[in-house]
Each structure stands twice: as C-alpha cells, then as structure tokens.
Image: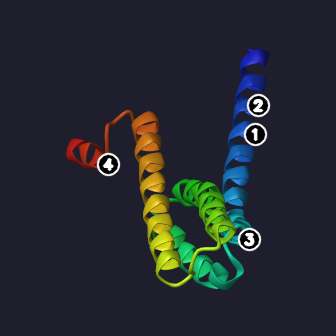
Amino acid sequence: MAASVIATVVSVVAAVCARILADELKAWRPWLTGKLIAFAARWVPDDQRDRYEEEWSAYVEETPGGVGRVFAALGLLWAATQIGFVSWKHRQKGADATEGGKRQRRVGIVTLLNKISEFVNRFEAEFFMFGSASQLVSCL
C-alpha cells in the first residue's frame, strides 16, 4: 500500500517536472535558434552575412513546430560551412566575383534548401514512421 502511494507521488512529481522543463525549452527556443543562425552566418562571406541571416531567420520562423525550427537552424550550420568553403575556394582561385560569384551563391542556396529538405524528410520518416508529410496527412 505504501509503495503504491510513493510510486503515485513520484510519478506526479515527475510529470510536473517534465511539464516545467518542456515549457522552459519552449521559451528558450527563439533565443537558441537566433544564436544558431547568427553562428551559422559567421561562416558565410562578410558581404553576404546580413542577407543570409535575414533569409535564414525567415526560413526558420516559417518552419512548423518548435522542434522542427531547432532542427532547421541546426541544418543551417552545416549549410553555412559548405557555403563558406565554396566561397573560400572561389576566392582562392582568383575568379571574377561578378557572374561566377552569383552562380556560386545560387548553387549554395539551392544546395542548402535541398539538404534541409532531405534532413526534414529523414526526420519525419524516423519520427513519425511515415515516408513523407503527405503520407502523414493522408492517414489523418
């Protein structure tokens, strides 16, 4: 009898603590995603940093769900390193920064969006056990 009362009290306390932790994480999510985006923007060339930071902030805020936004911001870190590396390589070659640079930026953005899309699809497949978001919606 005493063991069941103790187990009940422990489970109630654990549930309350879990709820408080979840609320705290939800409250800190905008700060965390902002810091991740700012850190990712450090990897891109200086003259493009503000533009990327603004675009990435809008992209992350359009992503549904709190966890999805954090994962999207984490994906931007990887993409930013790739963009920075391509830009560095381009500068090392001494290439003209006009047309070649524009092409590299377009390729970098497309690569970024493709990688984020692949990551989100993989996450949905593992987390929801569905192949894509459309399959999830069709089951609802």
Residue at the (50%, 70%) spot, across then down? 104
Query: Element type at marker 4?
Result: helix
Residues at discs 4 and 3 in contact (Cβ within 8 Å)? no
Identify the residue shown where x is 45% and y is 66%: 107
Name the residue: 70% across, 32% down.
Answer: 11
Q: Position of residue 45 (x, y in %)?
A: 68, 75
Tell me the mark number nearer the camera, choosing from 3 and 2.
Answer: 3
- Tell me the number on the disc at residue 42: 3
Residue wearing tag 4: 133
Q: CA distance from mark 3 to mark 1?
A: 42 Å
- Label 1: which secondary element: helix
Amino acid at circle 1? Val
The answer to whether the residue labelled 1 contacts the one labelled 2, judged by CB atoms less than 8 Å apart, is yes
Query: Nearer the N terminus, badge 3 or badge 2?
Result: 2
Quarter holding the N terminus?
Answer: top right
User: Observer-nearest residue: 31 or 97?
Assistant: 97
* Residue that carries the numbered disc 2 in the rendered image: 10
